[in-house]
Amino acid sequence: MANLGDSMHPALPRKGGRGGLSRQERLAYWMLFPVLGVIFCVVTYPFAVALVQSVTATRGGKFVGLLNYQSSLENPLLYASLKQTAIYAAIVLPLEIVLGLLLALLVHRTVRSSWLKLVLYLLAITPIVIPPVAVGVIFRLIYAPNYGVLNHLLIMAGWIHQEINWLGQPYTAMLAVASVDIWQWTPFVYLVLFAGLQTVPRESVEAAQVDGATSWSQFWHIELPYLRPLLLLILFFRLADVLRVFDHVFILTGGGPGTTTQLLSLYLYRIAFKFFDTGEAAALAVMVMVGISLLYSFITRLLPLERD
């Protein structure tokens, strides 16, 4: 009878030991503990501390309820920083996605040499691995009014006749800090989308070309459905990066002139470390995290992950 029962359920794992778990299942749970510990230390514990600080007074630690949230929401500088962050995102995100997509399509359709693809891969990954502080210093040497390379080259070319204070004027300062983001992260978009293009079945592309499909039709009906989940991930990750961008903006302009480049992260930094109001800073951090979660939910509903 025992042999008959085993033959009726050949795929069921063998149970045994404590809790009725198999040895493989217990091993899997033990292997998860380090990961869960890292997540607790890096995510759960800091968020819990921020949550507690957001409802306590900065001095004395007295419980104040939602007073810190009210103070942060009544500060007009918060809405100014949100506006500057939205302008920054409206500049960098479309340009990075469009430029990265065009570059990926160009390389995918025209470059056949594996060596050239390797060289392009190395060139694309270089800006990503450079520390943001170093990138900020490099671009400060480019945009500086007195010794900047950009002004020197433009004067030599005859395009301008006097130096431009790129970092000292509101519009040029925002464009200058945005250009750094575009230079550093467009290659990331290119690498992700180029990898996605490698998953498009060659048979589908060849069949479309035999039927006389144009390049645009080939992209829209065959390649874009495969890239859509990647575009969603790129949009979310880059949007999260824009909300926490700090280093190169702090080095280039420090949030100025005035508050024209004071993004949300710089505003939060000033609240926490310049005015030492940890309660309001924690309330802002909690609201930003909740906002990112809601935004991610909206994006996932707007762009379905499944392919057509």
Image (cartoon, rainbow, N blue to C red):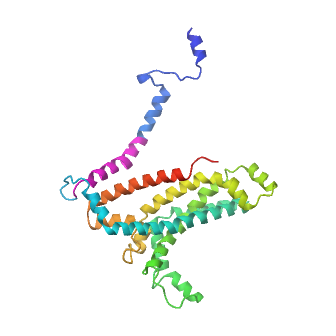
Residue 217 located left or right of residue 79? right
| Residue appearing at x 33%, y 59% in the figure | 284
| Residue appearing at x 56%, y 85% in the figure | 154
Q: Quadrant of residue 266?
A: bottom left
Quarter containing the N terminus: top right
- In the foreground, 185 or 140: 185
Residue 48's spot in the image, x, y percent? 31, 48
In the picture shown, does residue 241 fall above or below 28? below
Residue that lies at the very extreme toward the top in this rendered image: 1
Residue 199's spot in the image, x, y percent? 67, 50
In the picture shown, does residue 180 fall above or below 279? below
In the picture shown, does residue 178 fall above or below 23? below
**Residues rendered magenta in the picture:** 35-57
Residue 138 located left or right of residue 50? right
Residue 32's spot in the image, x, y percent? 44, 38
- In the foreground, 48 or 156: 48
- In the foreground, 231 or 302: 302
Residue 130's spot in the image, x, y percent? 50, 64
How many labels were placed on the picture? Answer: 0
| Residue appearing at x 41%, y 72% in the figure | 261
In the picture shown, does residue 160 fall above or below 133? below
Residue that lies at the very extreme toward the bottom in this rendered image: 161
Please name the predominant secondary structure of the magenta segment in the image: helix
